[in-house]
Structures are given as C-alpha cells and as structure tokens.
Image (spheres, helix red, strand yellow):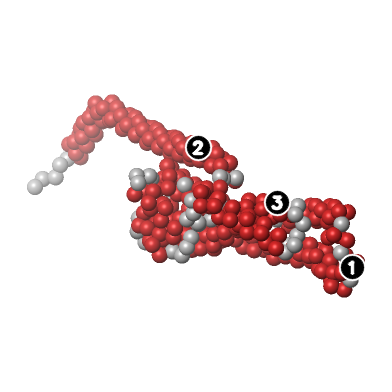
Amino acid sequence: MFGLEPAVLGFIVLATCSAGALAYALLFTTIANEQKVERRLETVKRAETDRAAVKASRDRVAEVSKRRKTIQDSLKDIENRQKGRDLYLKKPPLKIQIRQAGLNVSIERFYVYSAIAGVLLALLTLIVGAPLFAVPGALLVGGLGLPRWVVGFLRARRVKAFLNEFPNALDIIVRSVRSGLPLNDAVRMIAAEAPEPVRTEFRRIVEGQQLGMSMAESTLRMSETMPCSEASFFGIVIQIQSQAGGNLSEALGNLSKVLRDRKKMKAKVGALSMEAKASAAVIGSLPFIVAFLVYITSPSYIAPLFTTGTGHLILGVAGLWMSMGIFVMRQMMNFEV
C-alpha cells in the first residue's frame, strides 16, 4: 500500500476543516437558537417554581390567618355566651343552687323543710327562755337563713370534691385519646368509673349526647351544674377543638397541668393566710368566752345585759359591730385564685 503524498494529505486535511467550518457556520444559528430556547425554558421553569413557592407560602399564611380568625371568632362567641352564663350562675335561682348542691329535692319540698326548721328553731328559742322579740328573729333564721346556708355548704363541698378529682379524670381522657380511643368513649369511661361527683357530671354529658347534643354543647353546660371556672375551661377547650381543630390530647394535658397548678396555688394561699384566720377566730370568739367566764364567776355583774332594756340595746350594738368586724376580717382573708 502506497503512502499518500504530503500535498494530497494536506489537501484532505484542509478539505475536512473547510467542511467542518462550513457545517458549523450553517448550524451555528440553529445551535444558538436551541441554547436560547433552553435558557428561556429554564428561566420559565424557575419562575414557575418561584411562583408556586410564593403561592404556597401565601396559601399557608392565608390558612393560618383564616384559622386564627376562626379561633378568635370562636373565642369571642364563647366569651359572650360565658358572660351571660356567669351572670346567671353567680347568683343562680334557688332551684339551680339545690341542683348544684347535689340534692334531689324539689323547690316545694325545700320550702316545706325551711318552714319546719323555722318553727323548730322558734320553739327552741321559747324553751330556753329567750326574750319574745328574739322569736321572730329565730323564725326568720330557721326558715330562710339556715336551710340556704346548708345548701351553700353542700354546694361548696361538692365543688371542692369535684376539683380534687377532675384533673385525674382529664389525665385519663388524655391517655385514652393518645392510645387511639375516641373522645366519646373516654367520656363514657369516666362517667362509669370515676368517683363522685365527677361521675355524675360526665354522665350528664353522655346523656346530653344521647339526646342529640354535640360534645361541645354538653361540656359547656357542665358549668350550670358545677359552678366553678375549671368546668368552664373544659367546655371552652372542647368547643375550640371542635371548631378549629388541633391536638386534643395536648390541649387537655395543658388544662390538667393548669388545674393542678391552680390547686397548688390555692393550697399555698390557704397556708399563708392560716395565721390570719387563726387570729380572726381567736378575736371573734374572745368576747363570748369572756362573757361566759364572767357569767360563771359573777352572774349578778353581767345579768343586767340580759334583763334590762339598756342591756339589750348594748348587746344589739355590740353584736352589730362584732358582725361588721368579722365581715371585714373575712374579706381581708379571702383570696381569689
């Protein structure tokens, strides 16, 4: 095989380079256009991605704003209804007070018991030899004051028992919800197994649902039979969760923690005010103790207070001032937590 001459080889190389240059010259515009198209497509894709990100961010902000507005509207509505309910429950009718005390007594029977108590106390006043003007006072105290005081005492004791057990019931609900149990089943479990009076209050919630009420409506009605802010807190949490969503177990767990902290604070306030209460008890009982000791040692010296009109007047004025002092001390020692 013969080798090519240098001139022929150079001619081939030049021809090849010329053909390549001609092809590049012919295809340069097409290649440049394709590169421009690719860059434009890349710019369009990047712009679309940025618009999608901006739109998603705007949607998230709008959703958060909408949810915040929904929560605010719900809170405002609940607050307005709660104000009306609080005005009704701060001084509820006697029928509601009897129900809140856990007594299964009709209002007519309560009035009968009040009349019997008034008559018995008036007879007891006559038997012990008190003056005749004290009999109407004893009748009023026995007929109006004593029965209502008993209702108030039972009402306060029932609220205290409820507050002692209510955080434990909330903890059981939180554990049940976290384990996958529905809220309705958790409430039914509390209504069946919790101690009184928590069991009765949650049983009313279950009965309300059986009558067609929602869980939020049933829990908000708890404050009508259990006059304490903690029951209102529970109803508000359930109402907000049902309208705006959220983590129910976390909300109830926080509520349980708040209730326990309130209980600790009340105990701390009670311990700090115990000295003042003891002093008030000593000061309040001192006049009666002194009068009893003087009556034992020198009955003729103190007898004019009980046998003369001037003595009765002095006793009345002293009792009035004593009552005012006890009322002032009581207001100074009572703290709302």
State the image coordinates of residue 149 (x, y, percent, origin top left): 62, 55
Q: Is residue 108 left or right of residue 316?
A: left
Query: Is residue 157 depicted above or below 46 in this figure?
Result: below
Pointer 2 residue: 77
- Residue picked out by circle 3: 136
Is the C terminus in the top left, top right, bottom left or bottom right quadrant? bottom right
Looking at the rendered structure, the kind of residue marked 1 is Ser
Q: Residue at x 49, y 54 (%)?
A: 105
Residue 113 percent location from the top left of the image: 55, 55
| Left or right position of 324 against 243 | right
Q: Residue at x 84, y 73 (%)?
A: 296
Q: Earlier in the sequence, mark 3 or mark 2?
A: 2
| Amino acid type, label 2 | Asp
Nearer to us in this view, 67 or 209: 209
Q: Is residue 156 visible?
A: no
Image depth: mark 3 or mark 2 in front:
3
Residue 109 percent across, percent down from the top left:
51, 52
Q: Are marks 3 and 1 in contact (CB under 8 Å)?
A: no
In the displayed structure, would residue 141 be above or below residue 88?
A: below
Disc marking residue 117: none
Q: Is residue 298 visible?
A: yes
User: Which residue carries the number 1 mark?
Assistant: 300
Residue 82 located left or right of residue 297: left
